[in-house]
Amino acid sequence: MLSQVESQMSEAGIEFDAGRLLLLQKYVSLLITANAKSNLTAIKDEAGIWDQLVLRSMRFHPIISSLKGDSRVIDVGTGAGIPGIIFAIMYPDMRVTMIDATGKKIRFVSEAIDALGISNSRAIQGRAEQIGRHPDHREHYDLAIARAVGSLTELAEILIPLVVPRRGRAAALKGADIDQEFKDASRASAEVGAPNPSTLVVATPGSSDGDNLIIWDKIRPTPRAYPRRDGVPHKSPLFGQHHVGTRT
C-alpha cells in the first residue's frame, strides 16, 4: 500500500521524503486502532483511509503549496485530523491549527499529535463560530480550509473571518455540480470580505475524477457582525441561500 501511495503522490507532482510517508503510515495505524474503540470516521479499513482520507486531502495541495513555509493554516471541522494532520506531516514548516466541536475527535487528534511528534500543530475543541469571534484566532491565519460540510454560503461565513485581510485565503472542496450554489454564495462571501471567489478543478492523486476547490481571497476586514452566533450560519444562511452540503 505504501509504495502505491508513494507512486500516486509522485505522479501528482507532490514532493515528500520517506520520513513523511512513514509518519503518514503511523497516523493511519493510529486511526485504525482508535476507530476500533470509538467511531471517529465512517471509513474503517486501511485501504479506504489511505484513498478516501489521506490521498483525497491532497486535493488541497495546489493552494497549500503556494504558501510560504511559516504560514498559519487552520482546518475547520477537522474530525479525526483530516486534512490537518496530513498537512502538518507533509508541510512541516507550516503551523497547523485543527478545530472541531466533538470532544472525542479532538482528544484523538491531540493524542496523535503527541504520538507522531508533529510539533507544528495543535488541536482545539470549539465551534467555528466561536473560534471566528475569538481575538486569538479572528483574522489570524494565512489560510482557512474545510472539507465541505454545509453550503458554500455557510462556509464563507465561518472560514473568511479567520484569515488575515489583504493576504489571507479560504478554501473548501465541493463536488462537480456547484454552479448555482457558487453563484448564490458569491454575495455572502463579498459581505464578509472576499468578493469574487474562484474555482479550480482538482483531482485525488492517482485518480482522474475532478472536484472543485473553491478559493476566496480576502481583500478587506470582516464586519464585526460575522460570523453570527453558533448554528445560525447553517440554519439561516446569509441572504437566504441554502444548499445541502456533503463531506468530500
Image (cartoon, rainbow, N blue to C red):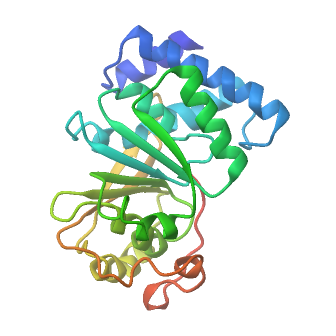
Horizontal side of residue 151 vs 172, given as left or right: right
Asked if 78 appears above or below 153 in the picture, the reply is: above
Extreme-front residue of the structure: 135
Q: Residue at x 33, y 58 (%)?
A: 170
Extreme-bottom residue of the structure: 239
Q: Residue at x 63, y 58 (%)?
A: 101
Front residue of 26 and 13: 26
On the image, the x and y values in percent for residue 52 come to 60, 37
Q: Quadrant of the N terminus?
A: top right
Asked if 196 appears above or below 15 in the picture, the reply is: below
Q: How many marks?
A: 0
Whether residue 190 is visible: yes
Front residue of 225 and 181: 225
Front residue of 225 and 65: 225
On the image, the x and y values in percent for residue 139 come to 29, 63
In which quadrant of the rendered view does residue 7 lie? top left
Q: Residue at x 41, y 50 (%)?
A: 74
Front residue of 80 and 43: 80
In which quadrant of the rendered view does residue 25 lie? top right
Whether residue 45 is visible: no
On the image, the x and y values in percent for residue 142 come to 27, 51
Horizontal side of residue 188 vs 8, given as left or right: left
On the image, the x and y values in percent for residue 218 come to 23, 66
Q: Residue at x 43, y 26 (%)?
A: 89
